[in-house]
Image: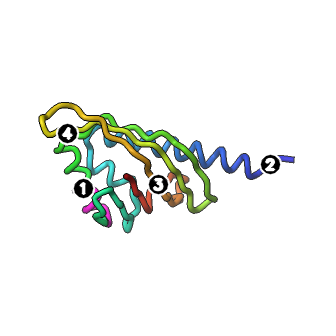
Amino acid sequence: MTNLASSTSFDVKAGIIEAYAAWDSAFNKADARAVATAYVSDAKVLPPNHQVISGPAEIEKFFAGLFSSGFVDHKLTIIDAGGDDKIVYGTARWSANGKGADGSRQAAGGIATHVFERQADGSLKLRLHTFN
Protein backbone atom coordinates (compact mmCIF):
# COMPACT_ATOMS: atom_id res chain seq x y z
CA MET A 1 0.00 0.00 0.00
CA THR A 2 1.35 3.44 -0.95
CA ASN A 3 1.60 6.07 1.74
CA LEU A 4 -0.25 8.94 0.05
CA ALA A 5 0.78 11.50 2.68
CA SER A 6 4.49 10.89 2.10
CA SER A 7 4.05 10.93 -1.67
CA THR A 8 2.01 14.15 -1.53
CA SER A 9 4.48 15.82 0.84
CA PHE A 10 7.37 14.95 -1.45
CA ASP A 11 5.53 16.39 -4.46
CA VAL A 12 4.66 19.54 -2.49
CA LYS A 13 8.25 20.02 -1.39
CA ALA A 14 9.57 19.43 -4.92
CA GLY A 15 7.05 21.94 -6.30
CA ILE A 16 8.06 24.57 -3.79
CA ILE A 17 11.76 24.01 -4.43
CA GLU A 18 11.05 24.50 -8.15
CA ALA A 19 8.99 27.66 -7.47
CA TYR A 20 11.76 29.03 -5.21
CA ALA A 21 14.40 28.38 -7.89
CA ALA A 22 12.33 30.23 -10.51
CA TRP A 23 11.69 33.13 -8.11
CA ASP A 24 15.40 33.39 -7.20
CA SER A 25 16.31 33.31 -10.90
CA ALA A 26 13.95 36.19 -11.73
CA PHE A 27 15.19 38.18 -8.71
CA ASN A 28 18.84 37.60 -9.58
CA LYS A 29 18.23 38.87 -13.12
CA ALA A 30 16.75 42.04 -11.51
CA ASP A 31 13.57 41.35 -13.51
CA ALA A 32 10.81 42.92 -11.42
CA ARG A 33 8.15 42.02 -14.01
CA ALA A 34 9.17 38.33 -13.96
CA VAL A 35 9.13 38.36 -10.14
CA ALA A 36 5.62 39.85 -10.20
CA THR A 37 4.36 37.08 -12.50
CA ALA A 38 5.10 34.57 -9.73
CA TYR A 39 2.08 35.98 -7.81
CA VAL A 40 -1.68 35.60 -8.32
CA SER A 41 -3.52 38.78 -9.34
CA ASP A 42 -4.67 39.66 -5.82
CA ALA A 43 -1.56 38.50 -3.96
CA LYS A 44 -0.15 40.29 -0.91
CA VAL A 45 3.51 40.86 -0.07
CA LEU A 46 4.24 41.84 3.53
CA PRO A 47 7.86 43.04 3.90
CA PRO A 48 9.60 44.00 7.16
CA ASN A 49 8.71 47.69 6.71
CA HIS A 50 5.03 46.78 7.46
CA GLN A 51 3.88 48.02 4.06
CA VAL A 52 1.03 45.97 2.52
CA ILE A 53 1.74 45.45 -1.17
CA SER A 54 -1.16 44.20 -3.32
CA GLY A 55 -1.34 43.02 -6.90
CA PRO A 56 1.12 42.72 -9.76
CA ALA A 57 1.79 46.44 -10.38
CA GLU A 58 2.61 47.18 -6.72
CA ILE A 59 4.66 43.98 -6.41
CA GLU A 60 6.65 44.84 -9.53
CA LYS A 61 7.25 48.39 -8.24
CA PHE A 62 8.37 47.10 -4.82
CA PHE A 63 10.94 44.69 -6.27
CA ALA A 64 12.13 47.25 -8.85
CA GLY A 65 12.91 49.47 -5.86
CA LEU A 66 14.96 46.73 -4.24
CA PHE A 67 16.88 46.19 -7.46
CA SER A 68 17.60 49.90 -7.84
CA SER A 69 18.88 49.86 -4.24
CA GLY A 70 21.42 47.22 -5.25
CA PHE A 71 19.94 43.99 -3.92
CA VAL A 72 21.37 40.89 -5.65
CA ASP A 73 22.27 37.24 -5.02
CA HIS A 74 18.92 36.18 -3.55
CA LYS A 75 18.58 32.60 -2.29
CA LEU A 76 15.59 30.83 -0.73
CA THR A 77 16.38 27.68 1.25
CA ILE A 78 13.33 25.61 2.20
CA ILE A 79 12.67 24.91 5.88
CA ASP A 80 9.27 23.23 5.64
CA ALA A 81 6.47 22.62 3.17
CA GLY A 82 2.96 21.25 3.20
CA GLY A 83 -0.50 21.62 1.86
CA ASP A 84 -2.82 19.85 -0.53
CA ASP A 85 -3.64 19.79 -4.22
CA LYS A 86 -4.93 23.41 -4.13
CA ILE A 87 -3.14 25.42 -1.40
CA VAL A 88 0.52 24.89 -0.52
CA TYR A 89 2.75 26.61 2.04
CA GLY A 90 6.48 26.91 2.36
CA THR A 91 8.77 28.41 4.92
CA ALA A 92 12.31 29.36 4.03
CA ARG A 93 15.46 31.11 5.02
CA TRP A 94 16.32 33.88 2.59
CA SER A 95 19.59 35.63 1.95
CA ALA A 96 20.68 38.40 -0.39
CA ASN A 97 23.32 41.04 -0.73
CA GLY A 98 22.49 44.71 -0.59
CA LYS A 99 24.45 47.93 -0.31
CA GLY A 100 25.42 49.54 2.95
CA ALA A 101 25.25 53.31 3.52
CA ASP A 102 28.84 53.59 2.22
CA GLY A 103 28.03 51.57 -0.92
CA SER A 104 29.80 48.42 0.23
CA ARG A 105 28.17 44.99 -0.06
CA GLN A 106 26.09 44.11 2.97
CA ALA A 107 24.57 40.69 3.64
CA ALA A 108 20.86 40.57 4.43
CA GLY A 109 18.64 37.67 5.35
CA GLY A 110 15.82 36.32 7.42
CA ILE A 111 12.82 34.03 7.40
CA ALA A 112 10.02 33.96 4.82
CA THR A 113 6.56 32.41 4.71
CA HIS A 114 4.81 31.69 1.41
CA VAL A 115 1.28 30.56 0.61
CA PHE A 116 0.88 29.28 -2.94
CA GLU A 117 -2.13 28.39 -5.07
CA ARG A 118 -1.76 25.54 -7.52
CA GLN A 119 -2.62 26.68 -11.06
CA ALA A 120 -4.50 24.65 -13.71
CA ASP A 121 -1.15 23.72 -15.32
CA GLY A 122 0.14 22.37 -11.95
CA SER A 123 2.50 25.29 -11.32
CA LEU A 124 2.47 27.26 -8.08
CA LYS A 125 1.78 31.00 -7.80
CA LEU A 126 2.12 33.02 -4.63
CA ARG A 127 -0.97 34.31 -2.83
CA LEU A 128 0.90 35.55 0.27
CA HIS A 129 4.58 36.33 0.84
CA THR A 130 5.82 37.67 4.12
CA PHE A 131 9.42 38.06 5.25
CA ASN A 132 11.57 39.66 7.91
Q: What element carries label 1?
A: helix
The residue located at (28%, 59%) in the rendering is: 49
Secondary element type, mark 4: loop
Question: Identity of the amino acid at label 1?
Answer: Phe
Crowding at label 4, few (<14), some or many (≥20) Cα neighbours within 10 Å?
Answer: some
Q: Is mark 2 on a helix, strand or loop?
A: loop
Marks 3 and 2: in contact by CB < 8 Å? no
Q: Mark 3 = which residue?
A: 113
Q: How far apart are marks 1 and 4 (CA)?
A: 13 Å
| Element type where label 3 sits in the image | strand
Q: Give the range drawn in magenta.
A: 54-62
User: Residue 48's image quarter?
Assistant: bottom left
The residue beneath circle 1 is: 62
Residue at the disc numbered 2: 3
Q: Is residue 55 magenta?
A: yes
Marked residue nearer the N-terminal end (1 or 4):
1
Looking at the rendered structure, the kind of residue marked 3 is: Thr
Residue type at the position of mark 2: Asn
Rate crowding at label 2 as few (under 14), some (14 to 19) or many (20 or more) other CA atoms within 10 Å. Answer: few
Question: Disc 3, disc 1: CB below 8 Å?
Answer: no
| Distance between the alpha carbons at the discs numbered 4 and 3 | 23 Å
Q: How far apart are marks 2 and 4 (CA)?
A: 46 Å
Quadrant of the image occupied by residue 69 = top left
| First reached walking from the N terminus: tag 3 or tag 1 | 1
